[in-house]
Image (tube, grey):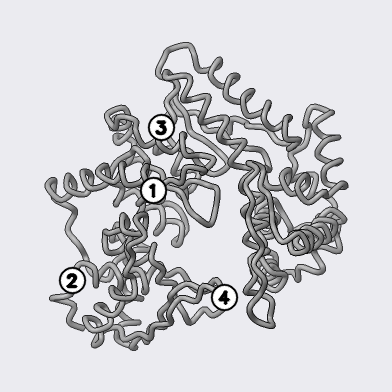
């Protein structure tokens, strides 16, 4: 197979489709090619922020260029069905064989980056261009944040810091890459992709219209594995996480009294057990093979509105158990499912959802008989995430008011900080955890910010 002459974008697209595709959950034959995906591959992610996307045009160009290598069908996005633009590729036996050979080389760690062909590392000039282009996005990112966004002030502050303070962290990247190589294949691919293509250790942040959360721009630092993250940010970094935040949030927001009381009683005793242990123990009486990772894989999508059909599929894949059997073994999970349905119906009857920041989000009636084209589930996800944001906003504000505490990375339910003043670490930890704890008490969310 002759791959010479293919453009850099064409090669990146092939690598995405063949090695690291984002598969449509409803139909695995289709691969998501949203504006974020396509402009990310094309190096024009700034156009997504500016809402000047032309992802279909990019796909049409690639369809012509790759017609003899990877022909594909395009399915346009459908806003009513909450469905992104996708492609269905037709992979020849010859291409499948090449993909398999590259997988073998990667699994043996004979190649560092899983790609269809070997590519030379970036030259110093190319790396500088990418780095400069990355930081030139600051103004665009800051100006695009809506005036009423709950994290507007924090995003602008995060993006306005000087990059030299983060440059010293780059020395930890090789060790982080070694840790990433030791992970299973899919995790290794994601982590190595992120580390190798990282333009700079300083994260820039952007907002999303679909979520109150803020996201790292142009790189996946928020999504790298915890063990890799710990190596990447060095020995002086302090890693803090909200404890079982989504459990605590849905207990409050959906009025799951049994879960709320369980968490409150545990907190009164000084939290001798983790919230996850409290949920898992009754289940393990019937299904001893079920652990924390299994329940977490279900609770997060459950909290963010995933349908029962998809929850059941995750339960079968992760737990080898039908979700209905799992929920019957747990009074808490059964109560959560009932409360979730009640909350969804309340949003529909009210015609709106008012988030913790006091902003109103309108309910949109379904346009099709199947009922899946309404926005009740996305509103429930937004509502839960908004509580997470208001808690983590206190951590960011603490760093804003304490210049000697460097905020190295904000994660959705966690944060990585570093004291730049000797002997102040313990005081900073106490201060930042207290700031988040005070807000948690104020809005009655039974969680706390803990050092990992």
Q: Nearer the viewer, residue 113 or 441?
A: 441
At which x and y percent is residue 50? Answer: 34, 56
At which x and y percent is residue 167? Answer: 28, 32
- The crowd level at tag 2 (other Cα within 10 Å; few <14, some 14-19, many 20+) is few
Residue at left 62%, top 24%?
A: 435
Q: Quadrant of residue 337?
A: bottom right
- The crowd level at tag 3 (other Cα within 10 Å; few <14, some 14-19, many 20+) is some
> Nearer the N terminus, badge 2 or badge 4?
2
> Nearer the N terminus, badge 3 or badge 1?
1
Q: Nearer the viewer, residue 263 or 288?
A: 263
Q: Which residue is mark 2?
A: 7
Question: Is 354 positioned to the left or the right of 398 in the image?
Answer: right
Spatial CA span between label 3 and label 1:
14 Å
Q: Are marks 2 and 3 in contact (CB under 8 Å)?
A: no
> Nearer the N terminus, badge 4 or badge 3?
4
Q: Which residue is mark 4?
A: 81
Q: Which residue is mark 1?
A: 144
Spatial CA span between label 1 and label 4:
26 Å
At which x and y percent is residue 438? Answer: 68, 26
Q: Comparing marks 1 and 2, which lies closer to the viewer? A: 1
Q: Which residue is mark 3?
A: 157
Q: Are marks 3 and 1 in contact (CB under 8 Å)?
A: no
Spatial CA span between label 2 and label 3:
38 Å
Local SS, label 2? loop
Labels in figure, total: 4
Spatial CA span between label 1 and label 2:
31 Å
Q: Quadrant of residue 103?
A: bottom left
């Amino acid at each position: 197979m002759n791959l010479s002459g293919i453009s850099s974008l064409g090669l990146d697209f092939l690598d995405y489709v063949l090695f690291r595709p984002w598969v449509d959950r409803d139909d695995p034959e289709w691969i998501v090619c949203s504006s974020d995906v396509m402009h990310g591959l094309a190096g024009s992610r700034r156009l997504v922020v500016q809402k000047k996307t032309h992802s279909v045009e990019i796909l049409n160009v690639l369809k012509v260029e790759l017609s003899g290598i990877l022909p594909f069908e395009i399915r346009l996005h459908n806003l009513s069905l909450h469905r992104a633009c996708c492609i269905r590729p037709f992979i020849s036996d010859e291409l499948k064989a090449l993909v398999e050979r590259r997988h073998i080389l990667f699994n043996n760690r004979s190649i560092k980056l899983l790609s269809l062909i070997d590519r030379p590392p970036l030259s110093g000039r190319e790396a500088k261009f990418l780095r400069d282009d990355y930081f030139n996005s600051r103004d665009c990112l800051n100006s695009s944040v809506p005036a009423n966004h709950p994290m507007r002030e924090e995003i602008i502050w995060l993006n306005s810091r000087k990059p030299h303070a983060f440059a010293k962290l780059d020395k930890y990247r090789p060790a982080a890459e070694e840790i990433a190589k030791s992970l299973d294949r899919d995790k290794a691919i994601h982590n190595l992709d992120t580390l190798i293509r990282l333009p700079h250790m300083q994260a820039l942040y952007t907002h999303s219209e679909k979520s109150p959360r803020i996201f790292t721009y142009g790189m996946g630092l928020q999504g790298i594995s915890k063990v890799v993250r710990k190596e990447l940010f060095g020995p002086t970094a302090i890693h803090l996480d909200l404890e079982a935040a989504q459990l605590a949030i849905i207990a409050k927001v959906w009025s799951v009294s049994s879960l709320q009381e369980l968490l409150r009683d545990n907190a009164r005793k000084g939290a001798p057990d983790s919230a996850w242990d409290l949920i898992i123990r009754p289940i393990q009486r019937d299904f001893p093979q079920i652990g924390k990772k299994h329940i977490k894989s279900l609770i997060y999508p459950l909290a963010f509105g995933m349908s029962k059909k998809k929850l059941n599929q995750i339960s079968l894949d992760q737990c080898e158990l039908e979700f209905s059997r799992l929920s019957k073994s747990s009074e808490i999970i059964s109560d959560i499912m009932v409360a979730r349905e009640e909350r969804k119906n309340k949003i529909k009857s009210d015609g709106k959802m008012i988030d913790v920041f006091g902003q109103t989000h309108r309910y949109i009636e379904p346009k099709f008989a199947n009922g899946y084209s309404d926005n009740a589930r996305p509103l429930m996800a937004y509502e839960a995430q908004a509580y997470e944001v208001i808690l983590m906003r206190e951590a960011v504000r603490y760093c804003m008011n304490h210049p000697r505490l460097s905020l190295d990375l904000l994660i959705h339910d966690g944060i990585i900080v570093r004291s730049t003043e000797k002997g102040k670490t313990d005081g900073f930890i106490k201060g930042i955890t207290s700031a988040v704890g005070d807000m948690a008490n104020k809005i009655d969310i039974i969680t706390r910010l803990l050092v990992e």
